[in-house]
Structure formats: C-alpha cells, structure tokens
Amino acid sequence: MSKGRYGIHGGQYVSEALMNEIQRLEECYEYYKKDEGFQAELTELLNNYAGRPSLLYYAEKMTKDLGGAKIYLKREDLNHTGSHKINNVLGQVLMAKKMGKTRVIAETGAGQHGVATATAAALLGMECEIFMGREDTERQALNVYRMELLGAKVHSVTSGTQTLKDAVNETMREWTNRMADTHYVLGSVMGPHPFPMIVRDFQSVISREAREQILKAEGRLPAAVVACVGGGSNAMGAFYHFIEDKEVELIGCEAAGKGVDTACHAATVTKGSLGIFHGMKSYFCQDEYGQIAPVYSISAGLDYPGVGPEHANLHDTGRAKYVPITDEEAVSAFEYIAKTEGIICAIESAHAIAQVRKIAADYSPDQNIIVCVSGRGDKDVAAIARYRGVDIHD
Amino acid sequence: MINENNKIKRAFHMPNAKALIVFLTAGDPDADSCVKFIPEMERAGADLIEIGIPFSDPIAEDEIVQAANIRAIKRGMTTDGVFDIVKRVRERSQIPLCLKSYLNPVFHYGYERFFEKCGELSVDGIIIPDLPYEEKAEVEEPANRHNVALIPMLAPASEERIERIAKNTDGYIYVTGSKEAVPSLVESIRRVTAAPCAIGVGIAAPKQVEHMASFSEGCIVESAAVKIIEEYGKEAAPRLYEFVKNMKEAVFAINL
C-alpha cells in the first residue's frame, strides 16, 4: 500500500503520469518542512503580509445570549484575502517557487482559494491560472473579477456539474499536461498524498495559535472545537493541535443543503459511503455503482462530494464527530452573528456558528468552545439577500 | 500473473505483427448498438476491443470520451449493464476484450465480485487510469485469480519508474503521452522487457497508425472511434467498419 494513509483512507490514486511529480513534491516538502530558512520566510509572510496571528475573540454577547459555554471565535476572516485559505497558499506558492516552478494553478469553489492563490502568485511573481465551475463563476462573479485584478486568468469549467469537483478535475488535467513549470496549489486537505498532509500542516497554524491563546485567556483547554467541513481544510487546521487532547470534542459541520433526507445536500460523512476519487480513498456522496453524485449547498465552498481522508479517519475512530447543518440553519446563523457580534462571516463559517447555537447551552459557563470563523462574508451578502427574497446582484 | 487461457496474446500473436486496439464507451449510444458495433469492428480487423465503463468524472480522458461517458450514464448505463453487453458480445465473438474503468466503479461493485464476473465472461484485461503501481495490490490478487490482466500504463513522465512497472507487465503496456515523446519512451521500455507496447496517444488517422506501429506492437484508437459513434449514433456500424478497416490496412502496410 502506498504512503499517506489515515487508517484505511488516503493514498495516491492518480494516473501514472502524475506519480513522479507528486513523489517529488513530497520529497521537496519534507526538505522545506525542516528547512529553517524556508520556515522563517513563511512565518514572515504569515505575520507581516497575511496578518497572523489571527485573533481569538471572546464573543461575549453570543455567550450571554446562548447561555452556556463561553464562545471564542478564531478569526480567520481577518486574514488578508478574508479567509484561512491564505495560510496554505503562502506555504505552497513559496515552496513552488523554491522548487523552480514559475506558474501555479488552482481550483476554486466559492472563490476564496482562487483569490488567495492569485494573491500569493502576484506577491511572489508567479503566473497564475484558476479553474472555477461555471455555476460558481456566476454565483461568485465578484471573486472572478477580483482574481483577474490580481493578474490571474480564470477558466470557467463547463464539464460535469460545473461546480467545485469539476474544477478539481480540470485542474488535475491541466497539471497532468503541464508539470515541468507548474505547481497545483490544491486548496483543501484532500487529493492524493502528500496534499492532505501539506495542506493540514500549513493550516495547523490555526490550532497552534488557538491552543496557546485559549490557555492564556482561560487557563484551560476548550470543551469543544467547531468548524465547517467541505474538503475540510479549516477544520483540519483548527482540530490538529487538539487531537491528542482527548477531552476536547472536535465537531465538523457539513452542508446539509435542503436537508439530508432530500437529494440536495453535500453531507459526505453523514450520507456518503467509502470510495476512491480525486486521488484518495475516503467518504463520498455517490450512487450504488460508484458514480459521484451531484451535491448541493447554498455555500459554494462546502459544495463538494468528498471529504479529506484524515477527517474520514477521525470519523472512523470516533475522535471527531460530523454533523449536518441545513441552508436554513446556516443563513439564520449568518444573520444571527451579524446582529449579535457585528461580524459578517462567510456562509461556510455560518454552518459552524449554527452548530454552536445548538450546543452552547449544553455546557457550563466555566467551559469554553472555540469556533473557527473560516472567512468573511462580503462575498455572500448578495446570495443571502436573494435567499431572503431581496433582489440584489453583485 | 495470468495463465495461457488469457486471450490478450492472440492480439499480438504473429511475429512482428502489430495489433489494432479499438475503444468504445459502453452504453453509447445504447447497449444494443454496442453489442452490434464490437463484432463489426472485429470483422474490420480490430485485434482487441477496450470497453469503457462510463464514469461521472473521467479525469484522464479528453473531451470526446468525457462526453461519451456522460451520455452513457444519462442513458442509464451501469456496471451491471456493461457486463450484460460483454455477455451478449461473448455469445458471438471470442475477440480479446479489456475493460477500461476508473477505480471507484470497480471498488463499489466489490473487487472479488467484479473480477469473478470478468472471469465468467472471459474478459481478458482491465485498464484503470487512476490505479498507479503503488496502489495496485488491492486489485491484483482477485484480478489475477480470475485470469484478468492488469494492464499497466506508462507515460514519458514515468522516467525511473519504467523499469519497475514494465518488468511486471501482464498482457501489454499501455503507452501514453505526447506523440513526440512516445518513441523514446518505447525505447526505454524495450531495455527492460519484451512485453508488447501499445500506443494510445489520440491516434485518429491511418498515417499516424503507420508511424506509431513502426516502433511498437500496436496502436490504441480511442477518441476517433468514439467520435464516429457520437456523430452517427445507432447508425455508426458501417462507418466504424470502414474506419477500422482503413486503420487495419495501415497496420498491414507496416507488417509487409
């Protein structure tokens, strides 16, 4: 069996043409991971360009209103480009540059990963091309223009369901055709090894900071860490340094769309089954013959039929639990945190907020819960307005 | 390893002969047509047929084959439906047959159940584009037990992997990559194995067959055949016959 296993999940299920490239990538990553110069350069970028460390903000009004555990928000929305995606992108683009690549490509769903990649490419002087499902280019038109402003070329993907999974397919095809000068900046903890490991490591800065911050603020670990899960990168980053702290509950919030009993959801762990797709063995939404199912969520960033292999294993071992949150619950949480805390969060992150609203009262006031606010919600305002029947367009 | 009952070697049987391998997607335009097309392609001179199991996300295929996959799924083709096509083909033809499938449909059917079915229907090989050498262990044992060859793929980017992969060939080596890069790739393969190399690089015209077959043991024709089916649908049989016959004549030109 190949490397990069999380229990039975993970692996390297890609075409022969890509194998050498991903093995080289793994070697390079292992080298730079231990290279002090690289790490110092990355830390410099994270702190003085992206704005890290991000705040761990005590949401006092929310805490009082929900009546239970103290709620802390890990404010990844305050990072440069407005989401956690920049953590991974700076690491990967910097590494790609060191590897001698001159061009980066990436898939994007909501556009946050695309914007972050285009940003890092602009900063580090790399060519950049982004693949985005046609449907997503329509619901996130502003982000398309943003990427173009940053100098990236955006390809509208018209194959398949025209959403995130198809954008991944197309980026994989592009990479297979052109590897010599190109690095694929995969945006989540998914795909073939070493990507789930690389992205997790770069995102683990979230829990490294949060763990220190909460110990400083509360003198104790959180009772729970809550994050939304599409592919699962902000959740993996938020969970990682708490995995060994068995008393900390880890809760991932999946997109239940119009409900897990309808055909319109993206609740991979809740409703999916074991499969092999996009280079990894994990859970996927699929039919009885293994055809990948069309998925749905109001959130373009969670609209993905799979989940990262490490999450699949955290589910198998019971270390983390994964819960479905509907569009309606997420939209209501989006409005709630805006009115209560004055924070317009991404609709993705609102899935985590929705779960906290459900569980906060089950804990005592001397306990605390950390919620990862993975991104800011400017990009979602028009869509939420439309959901509520107000006709606003980007 | 596969045993002597496996029919792949028949496709490469004559000394210095070149095999013509033709692909179609099961269920495109429908099952009945596929059952008709395959014997026609055999009659026109195809030595081996690859039958694609349609998949929702055929990442390694070009746009023509992607579209055929989606058409076939829309018209209700399933893995059971593919086996039914094979069963009906086997009632009238013993041509060497390989399936081409992404791993997930095979995994979902159950490896043991899938290859047992292949064995029953005398399917000779399988090509799985997203199953590299490192991952093949989970499929190899049941495949071999049912005498189904796991056809390895090699690309110009394989480089130092060539030796390890080529030495373990069952059936033939599916050589892919750009038209310019395959001759030197085949040369590298030659150094480590005598296994037949078949070239699949978007071959669409007799001239290309002549060139590709001049330094290999065979040519794989995929999109060009699928395109004819896309264009002529259920009426494609005579067009496919004509097309395959022309390609085969180009192969014979080499053999002379």
Image (cartoon, coloured by chain):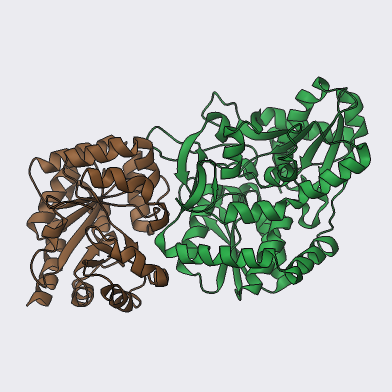
Chain colours: A green, B brown
Q: Is residue B143 left or right of residue B240?
A: right
Q: Is residue B2 left or right of residue B95?
A: right
Q: Front-most of B161 and B43?
A: B161
Q: Position of residue B129 (x, y in %)?
A: 37, 55
Q: Is residue B48 above or below residue B187?
A: above
Q: Front-most of B192 and A155?
A: B192
Which corner quadrant holds the C terminus of chain B?
Answer: bottom left
Q: Position of residue B195 (x, y in %)?
A: 22, 66
Which corner quadrant of the image does residue B246 belong to? bottom left
Furthest residue toward top: A362
Q: Is residue A59 above or below residue B47?
A: above
Which corner quadrant of the image does residue A183 belong to? bottom right
Q: Position of residue A330 (x, y in %)?
A: 71, 32
Q: Front-most of B111 and A295?
A: B111
Q: Front-most of A7 and B70?
A: A7
Task: State the count of labels.
Answer: 0
Q: Position of residue B237 (x, y in %)?
A: 14, 52
Please give the name of the residue rendered at 40% of the width and 43% of the height, measured from the top-left corner: B104
Q: Is residue A360 above or below residue A390?
A: above
Q: Is residue A14 left or right of residue B176?
A: right
Q: Is residue A9 left or right of residue B240?
A: right
Q: Is residue B28 above or below residue A328?
A: below
Please give the name of the residue rendered at 63% of the width and 34% of the height, measured from the top-left corner: A255
> Do we see residue A244 in this rendering?
yes
> Do we see residue B28 in this rendering?
no
Please give the name of the residue rendered at 25% of the width and 70% of the height, measured from the top-left corner: B193
Please give the name of the residue rendered at 72% of the width and 40% of the height, measured from the top-left corner: A244
